[in-house]
Image: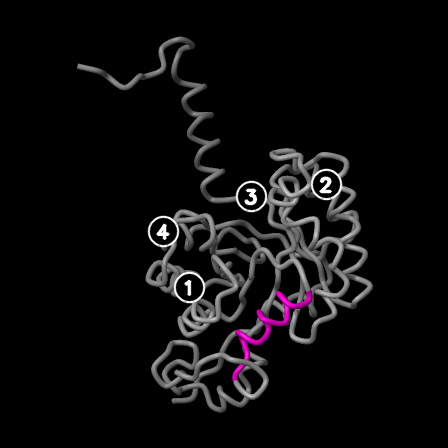
Amino acid sequence: MPLRLNPTFRDALAHADRSLAGMWVCTGSPLVAEICAGAGLDWVLIDMEHSPNGLESVLAQLQAVAAYPVTPLVRVPIGDVVTIKQVLDLGAQNILVPMVSSRTDAEAAVAAVRYPPRGTRGVGSALARSARWNRVDGYLQDADAHVSLFVQIETAAGVEAAGEIAAVDGVDGVFVGPSDLAASMGVLGQQTHPDVIAAVHRTFDAVRAAGKPVGVNAFDPAAAQAYLDAGASFVLVGADVGLLARGSEDLAARFIPAGHATERASY
């Protein structure tokens, strides 16, 4: 029976009449991913770079969120052709490649998500969820339409090359990472430092001038709104682990008297 795949994040952005809000999914738990997918947000980012996610857990999360009207992106840990091939074969249609700092980096990422002769992606669709085991008619011929690629600029060098990166054919959008950008600029941990914010805005301008959508990570609500006002097309506004950490801390602060917090016993 022929099957149809969902629209990509590229398609969602192209048809949106507003900025799209999403959240990180970092626990590695399909159950948590499903809870987040049903929250009413536009997209979720399943992270493999800084989270305990491998191929099996990413597959389970993609399956868990598939029933909900939310678009999943998967951030691979590195722009490695083999890793990208495996994640695509799991059925991920939207890939985010971190630490893209040059046109060459962007071109390599594009090649990794495309089949020959336009790229280097290995052919295994008959064995993979990507083509639903050959149940998607014409998957190999139409693969570019089923996959969107976003690259992450998070270094000072990347900011300077943002226009060239965004202009690469096959790059569907750029995501700015202020945390690593701050570190690259010598202000580690200061994502809202004026110099970092200015660099983010320069990236916005360069990417939009290339005709591509640009997004950013911003956990602080005020920072998120400021970036939305500055023209961000998509923003990550929270993370499952952050919400759980802050929420559990709020419970402890409310119900545990000051000075009575439980400490690990030593014997």
Q: Which residue is mark 1?
A: 62
Residue that appears at 66% across and 40% down: 182
Q: Please tell me whether residue 228 belongs to the stretch shown in magenta.
A: no
Question: In terms of secondary structure, what is the magenta stretch mainly?
Answer: helix
**Amino acid type of disc 4?**
Ser
**Amino acid type of disc 2?**
Val
Asked if residue 195 is positioned above or below residue 201 in the image, the reply reads: above
Gap in Å between the C-alphas at discs 3 and 1?
19 Å
Q: Which residue is mark 4?
A: 29
Which stretch is magenta?
Answer: 103-115
Question: Which comes sooner in the sequence, label 3 or label 1?
Answer: 1
Question: Which comes sooner in the sequence, label 2 or label 1?
Answer: 1
Q: Which residue is mark 2?
A: 196
Gap in Å between the C-alphas at discs 3 and 2?
19 Å
Question: Which comes sooner in the sequence, label 4 or label 3?
Answer: 4
**Amino acid type of disc 3?**
Gly
Q: Position of residue 244 (x, y in %)?
A: 44, 37
* Relative depth, front residue between 201 and 195: 195
